[in-house]
Amino acid sequence: MNRSIRLFAVLAFGMSLAVALPAHGKSTGEVARQSIPSVLSARTLALGANHTCAITLQGGVKCWGSNNQGQLGDGTQEDRAAPVDVRGLRSGVRAITAGAAHTCALMDNGSVKCWGAWAPSRVEAERRSSTTPVDIPDLDKGVMAIAAGGEHTCALTRDGSVLCWGENYAGQLGIGRLFGSYARPTRVKELGGIVQAVAAGRSHTCALLQSGELECWGDNNDGQLGLEMVSTGGMVSPQRVRALRGKAVAVTAGAQHTCALTDRGEVFCWGNNEEGQLGDVTLMRQGAISRVIGLPRPARQLSAGDWHTCAVLTDGSAVCWGEGDFGKLGDGTSWLNSAVPVAVSGLNGGLREVASGGHHTCAVLSNNQVLCWGSNLDGQLGTRRSGQSRAPTNVVGLTSAAQVAAGGSFTCALTQADSVRCWGANFSGQLGNAGTTDSATPVDVVGLSAGARAVDVGPNHACAITAGGGVRCWGYNWAGQLGDGTTDNRSQPVSVQGLTGVRAVSVGAVHTCALLEAGNVRCWGSNEYGQLGEDAVTQRRTPVADVRLEGSARAIAAGDNHTCALMTNGKVKCWGYNGRGQLGNGSTITRSVTPVEVQGLDGEVVAIGASTHTCALMRDGSMRCWGDNLYGALGDGTRLDAQTPVRVQGLSGKARAMALGGFFTCALLENGSVQCWGSDLYGQLGKAAAVQQNTQPVAIQGLAGTAQSISAGDDHVCAVLSSGAVQCWGRNFYGELGNGTSGYHTVPVEVASQ
């Protein structure tokens, strides 16, 4: 199998709520109204880049989601898909705030405790991470409110002054100088009055004065300080926001934008507007202040996430605007941005508070119930399921599979009845069911209910061999990789022109190749790096002339931008992109349109696979790999690229099949077990605890039987068991694991109690 290079991590920066003193006091598309014991109740919320925290009705703190820096405060660095108690904070908490990867709590006695990436100790200038709360030096009493930004935090004291600590590369601490990091709270200088609320963005900070005026400092590259002009270098002391119309009663800061709520219920925003987060359809990047147009009624509460903004209206409903990825606007769409406010679906009033994070949003209802929507990759929605699974999970309703093929964010299976079914992402029609709606369970591919012989998939398109020896493809088609003579996406299979007698098909990132019965190879789609095996650097919408192999092939493998063939004489030849040595001929010449022989294969090759790297399975059950090794996908114990094959180390038995993912590799052993190595960002190695990578094989635990075949996608793996059932693990953004869930929700879902 073969994969494409895709963005494997989303970098979200800290956002903050407008933190003044807070009041004490199912399936996607369905929101339960009744309060039941399994649903979390809370007083208030704080959302970080990829984690969520809540103050319980008892005054304690529970957190869930990403925990790579200890930001959940439970003493571990394990992600949690359901709320866990912050150690030592069962009561006495008045307010909370969350940064990119840290969290802080304001206690009833006026002291402050923090945990996660920025947890300063009482030793001057010491910075460290902490997985449990630590006391902030010099803030043991007198604090009224707190606000966390990307990598800094600020506290508002009883006398109306502000103290900040953390990173200061853009002047976000407001202490009169740039750069450095400060482990102890330092007083903000030159404030123009008594402060009643403070908000912190990724690298800027704003204060709301008792007069209703605003002052901001720090990064102003996108005009987020409201100075009617952008500037570089950062403002190291507070600057008055001059053009705000009306008296501000609340302020909130996103990654690179700021919004204020006035006493008339109007909302004004300024700063970066690339995703529509200012609620202004005309401005992209500016310092001018604009009123949010399209609010159906006055707002009474406001929260800015990294790239989106949400408001609670006077009737208790909620609206959001800005970046819509993962459905975080809550309007039932998965990726659509909106520069005008859209209603959050399924709330029907009764909302007390909304909180916006990096790629998710949460709300507290008037009955204290907590609902969340958006990305759930790290479990930040608190639904007990994250957007990944580190253990095999059953594909729903698929018990008679003959073959499975994992793609970028979708999966297809050939059943024992010779039909093809697919599940997961469908934005390019890659599920083949004549639609473009994602599905977290298998759907039938139109026209392939019988007679299919094999299926293979790439990042966003798929192809099947028919009983007559032809090929039919569907999905993404910008480079002509479907082979029907067009560049139109297809949501159901179309025939590849001019192909008969096909023995095997292999799908690359944006190209496809077929092995014919005579042993010749023909390819189509993108040829930017010569992966079609012809000189012209252009796309081909139908199969081109035979690749010049100078012999017959018996197997093929299409990688991201290169292709390999296993020849009948046992040699391996590759062509196309070679920037990381994936052609295996000892060089890193960027491209080769002519097949070159892989050097140094010391044995008989029985199978090949290609992705960003290339591997060969040997007759003796060992494996050799070469090419990209950034995450240890070559399995030789290093992270050094290899221009010729290196032996995979640490296999616990003989391999009889293999699967190459985006930046990882898996082997199916003779005893039916599976081992994987390389990137583990989404649990694709099956390890209980998250790690960046593993440079040698680790065993997949929890398979419900012996595996008969395996396939690896960009960030997930699937196995066909001896029973015919299919189990998958790894990333589940779009339902690619087929277990009925996905890694995001486009409308609110309930947060579990624990």
Image (spheres, rainbow, N blue to C red):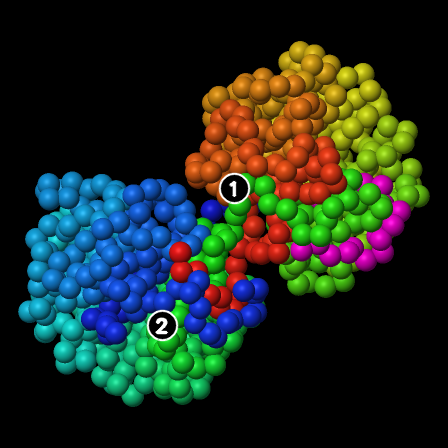
Image: 587 above or below 18:
above
Amino acid on which disc 1 is placed: Arg
Q: Quadrant of the C terminus?
A: bottom left
Residue 482 in percent (x, y) is at: 77, 50
> Does residue 304 lie above or below 506 as drawn?
below
- Circle 2: residue type: Asn
Seen at 76% across and 62% down, the residue is 434
Q: Mark 2 highlights which residue?
A: 368
Tell me, yes or no, whether the highlighted magenta stretch contains residue 363: no
Q: CA distance from mark 1 to mark 2?
A: 32 Å
Count of numbered circles on the image: 2
Residue at 41% in and 47% down: 79
Q: Residues within 10 Å of mark 2 (few under 14, many from 20)?
A: many
What residue do we see at 50% from left, 72% from top?
A: 32
| Span colored in magenta | 441-457
The front one of 575 and 173 is 173
**Measured from the top left, where is residue 438 in percent x and y?**
64, 60
Q: Secondary structure at mark 2?
A: loop
Camera sees residue 278 = no
What is the quadrant of residue 164 in the picture? Answer: bottom left
| Badge 1: residue crowd in 10 Å (few <14, some 14–19, many ≥20) | many
